[in-house]
Image (spheres, rainbow, N blue to C red):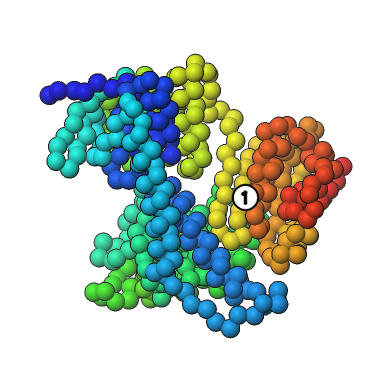
Amino acid sequence: MKLKQYDAIIIGAGQAGVPLAKKLAKAGKKVALIEKRWVGGTCVNDGCTPTKAWVASAKAAWTVTNSAHLGIKVKNYKIDMALIKKRKDDIVLNARNGTEKALDKISGLDLLYGEASFTGEKTIAVKMQSSTKHIKAGWIFINTGTETVIPKIEGLEAVNYLTSTSILELNKVPEHLLVLGGNYIGLEFGQMFRRFGSKVTLIERSARLLGKEDEDIAVEMQKILKAEAIAIHFSSEVIRLKQKEKGKITATIKTGDEEKKVKCSHVLLAVGRAPRTQILNLQNTGVEIDKKGYIKVNNKLETNVPGIYALGDVNGGPPFTHIAYNDYTIVYRNLIEGTNYNTDERPVPYCMYTDPQMGRVGISETDAKKKGLDIKVAHLPMARVARAVEVGDTRGFMKAIVDTKTKKILGATVLGEEGGEIMSVLQMAMEGGVTYDRIRYCVFAHPSYSESLNNLFMTIEE
């Protein structure tokens, strides 16, 4: 068996793998980038890019139906799901093709389409359409991401269920969408399809939505979804599914000791994600994984095997595109530029693209209290934000957690129009050590959403 030697092998052309491959090749390294499906990873192909394209269409539909109070009355409108899908597909293809063309132009970089598996500590077999290539390298970077968890439900295998990937192929609006899971994916798709015209029922196993967020955020989000006639069943689970040929699906929902049946046309699984590590044959490398299959790494993203790294979702860190990208910057700079960066204390901002958005960075009020921190909480309803009033959307609120003594901002959550953008302003303040008392009297452009940060911190009593 002939082994082709590379300086670096990258498994997975996601948001860490692609830029890392480019930079290593431009630094003079011989690089192999292996991709099983499409370049761009989940983000470009069935995550951020396509879903946010659909969120924009759903937002337009909601705006049309909620514009009467602005003096704009629309008698009727039509949802063209086929056109919505085509627009999304065009955006995805443009991004994917652009990435592929850029990779093809880079000298020293081989893009291999196939399935990778380890045959030894630093050797890999790439199973391609018509052949298998065997390659090796001193550096190996795993960027294979995660996939939808398929729960064990009686009758599920006989139902044409949807995942966050397959739902993006729909060109007709579901009559009744049953969503299993009340976190970020489930809420985004649930609200989206409700706005497209589907009846939506959401099943959540816990007693509330958004288990990682403060309870007041979860309660406010529940109010927003309820206002859009989305039915939510808490402390519930689907224990049985049954479908007659291609007809309606009957779901048996258990809440406590009670069971009831709900008929729907489509079922979306959104109960969690699992790492794509099974097909890698990591036992041949000695790389350690945890009980859930995530690859264990240190704070410099290196596994227990020197020279093998895991980037992005597959290492069990925060499951966000921007974190995967930051992973790439850390390993590249450390290996090529001789720096000493690590993942300790890095900010983890994120945004859920429901409407309104929920932007979050830093510690929550709940976690701060659990840790016994001496904090104050700033809280401002969007109804007191001038820009929100003028735009006509006062749903939600913003809050910030601050250290009583140092006056530094420890965390913030903004559930409101442009919540992610407002949160980013607060993140910049956190990065620069700008205290809340300074922001209270900062001069912001009027009328802007960020200007409301003045009023937010004026709610803190000295």
Image coordinates of residue 383 in percent, x first then y, are 75, 62
Image coordinates of residue 371 in percent, x first then y, are 65, 37
Q: Secondary structure at mark 1?
A: helix
Residue drawn 32% across and 45% down? 38
Residue at the outermost bottom position: 75
Image coordinates of residue 125 in percent, x first then y, are 21, 31
Residue drawn 63% across and 40% down? 362
Q: Is residue 145 visible?
A: no
Is residue 278 shown left or right of residue 442?
Answer: left
Residue at the outermost right position: 462
Pick the front one: 321 or 343 = 321
Residue under label 1:
420
Q: Is residue 82 visible?
A: yes
Q: Give the quarter of the figure containing the C terminus.
A: top right
Image coordinates of residue 98 in percent, x first then y, are 40, 44
Please, is residue 247 above or below residue 443 in the view?
below
Question: How dense is the environment of label 1, judged by Cα within 10 Å: few (below 14), some, or many (20 and up)?
Answer: many
Q: Give the quarter of the figure containing the N terminus.
A: top left
